[in-house]
Image: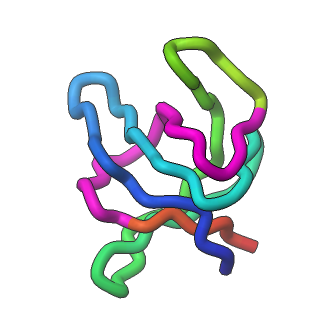
Amino acid sequence: MFKIGRVSHFYDKLGVAIVELDGTLSVGDKIKFVRGGEDLFEDIVESIQIEHKKVDSAGKGSVIGLKTNEVVREGAEVFRAS
């Protein structure tokens, strides 16, 4: 697994995590959320937004909005799953 970012905020009503990227992420990637060394859940990236605009991928240093299928809390780490 390769760490690609960290959740800085989660919007409950929208089901959107704000993720600060340390690596590259693209629509279609399989990701895993981990918090405190505990695996939370895996997800497939269906949508990425930067500044409310849809993009197909984002790179290191970007702050993105990421739709998730489950609730994830601030501080969770995001990994690319194999």
Q: Is residue 35 above or below residue 8?
A: below
Magenta segment's dominant SS is loop
Task: Name the quadrant containing residue 40.
Answer: bottom left
Task: Name the quadrant containing residue 31.
Answer: bottom right
Q: Is residue 70 above or below residue 31?
A: above
The residue nearer to you, when weighing 62 against 13, is: 62
Is 16 on the left or on the right of 26, as rendered? left
Is 47 on the left or on the right of 56, as rendered? left
Stretch in magenta: 57-76
The residue nearer to you, when weighing 9 against 33, is: 9
The quadrant the C terminus occupies is: bottom right
Q: Residue at x 64, y 43 (%)?
A: 45
Is 38 a magenta residue?
no
Is 62 on the left or on the right of 19, as rendered? right
Percent of width and height locating residue 27: 74, 38
Percent of width and height locating residue 62: 58, 40
Figure disc tally: 0
Q: Is residue 6 above or below residue 1?
A: above
The quadrant the N terminus occupies is: bottom right
Image color mode: rainbow
Percent of width and height locating residue 70: 36, 47
Is 72 a magenta residue?
yes
The residue nearer to you, when weighing 34 against 64, is: 64
Is 57 on the left or on the right of 78, as rendered? right
Q: Residue at x 29, y 63 (%)?
A: 75
